[in-house]
Amino acid sequence: MAESELFERGLQERRDVLGAEYVDANLADTDEFMMAFQRVVTEWTWGYAWSRPGLDRKTRSMLNLAILTALGRPDELGIYVKGAIATGVSVDEIKEILIHATVYCGTPAGRQAFRAAHEALLAEGVLRRPS
């Protein structure tokens, strides 16, 4: 089945933000059943929402970190920390986003978000464990 223009645009956006290696590995591990979900995510999230001209990638990344904190989705937040770094969000900005979200979302959500972000930042090599 040929992919739509929205899918192709979304796939490029998704690769640019999250990294081609991550996205391609995610798609390679997808069977026909799960590909229905991948198409929805790629077309709607990346091809439509992320490709709109109203906000830049950095702002969208910052919003995602706050939203994922509010939703209590630390696994997803860890993925989007890598994307935030790629779109120009600094470690200090990530910290401030999470502090702000913690105040509004509560300390359990904030703790999960800080832990997920910390692990992702360590994995990206932008933070180091204390010696």
Image (cartoon, rainbow, N blue to C red):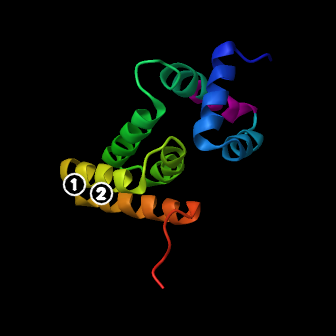
**Is 15 included in the stretch rendered in magenta?**
no
Q: Where residue 44 sits in the image (x, y, percent)?
A: 54, 22
Determine whether, in the image, residue 84 is placed left or right of residue 92.
Answer: right
Looking at the picture, which amino acid does disc 2 mark? Answer: Gly
Q: Quadrant of residue 12?
A: top right
| Side of 15 where 118 appears, left or right | left
Residue type indicated by callout 1: Gly
Which SS type dominates the magenta stretch? helix
Say what secondary structure mark 2 lies in.
helix
Disc 1 target residue: 106
Residue closest to the far bottom: 131
The residue to which callout 2 is attached is 110
Question: Residue placed at 51% from the left, 62% from the top?
Answer: 126
At 19% from the left and 52% from the top, the residue drawn is: 103
Badge 2 density bin: few <14, some 14–19, many ≥20, Cα 10 Å: many
Circles 2 and 1: CB atoms closer than 8 Å: yes
Magenta stretch bounds: 32-41
Query: Furthest residue to the left?
Result: 103
46 to 84, vertically: above or below: above
